[in-house]
Amino acid sequence: MSDDEAWDFVERGHTGIFTTLRRDGVPIALPVWFATLDRRIYLVTRGKKVRRVAHDARASFLVEAGERWAELQAVHLTGRASIIEPSADLTQRIAEQMAAKYSAFRTAAKEMPAATKAHYAKAGATIELVPDERIVSWDNHHLGLA
């Protein structure tokens, strides 16, 4: 994929795999919902991944699609992640994109157990992943086998 095709694929992606490093260097890969703005990845999250980013900024991000081998597509980004205090404008842009992508998939608060509702009511941190220039992508559609 060209860089433009790769970023278009990432922007259309539903779930990303965000990989950070534990203190002992072991990578931890977790599925996340995300926003893509200005060729950067944004997560609004909480928990250990925030602590891992604070300790070591190295991170990667993968978006993939397809079930049959001939359909497989993916984009893998590496870069530096940081916990940011976004401007009001950036906060709004992230929230708008997240709502557009995920509102149909969210569990209604009234359907959540009390502990889950309390957990998600806490404010989350915003993580920004600034990818380095190298994008690894593949698109088996181009093989003409499907």
Image: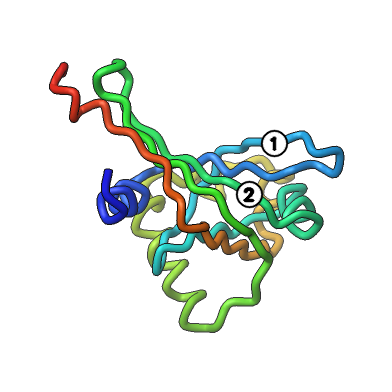
Quadrant in which the C terminus is drawn: top left
Q: Residue furthest right?
A: 24
Q: Amino acid at mark 2?
A: Ala
Vertical placement of residue 95 versus 74, above or below: below
The residue under label 1 is: 28
The answer to which quarter of the image holds residue 57 is: bottom right
Q: Which mark, by number, is residue 59?
A: 2
Please give left or right for residue 139 compared with residue 49 in the image: left
Residue found 40% across the figure and 50% down from its top: 102
Mark 1 surroundings within 10 Å by alpha-carbon count, few (fewer than 14), some (14 through 19), many (20 or more): some
Q: Position of residue 104 (x, y in %)?
A: 36, 47
Q: Residue furthest front?
A: 134
The answer to which quarter of the image holds residue 79 is: bottom right
Q: Which of labels 1 and 2 is toward the front?
A: 2
Q: Position of residue 107 (x, y in %)?
A: 50, 44
Mark 2 surroundings within 10 Å by alpha-carbon count, few (fewer than 14), some (14 through 19), many (20 or more): many
Residue found 56% across the figure and 48% down from its top: 110
Quadrant in which the N terminus is drawn: top left
Vertical placement of residue 115 versus 4, above or below: above
Please give left or right for residue 1 compared with residue 79 in the image: left
The number of numbered discs placed on residues in the rendered structure image is 2
Q: Amino acid at mark 1?
A: Ile
Residue found 67% across the figure and 52% down from its top: 58
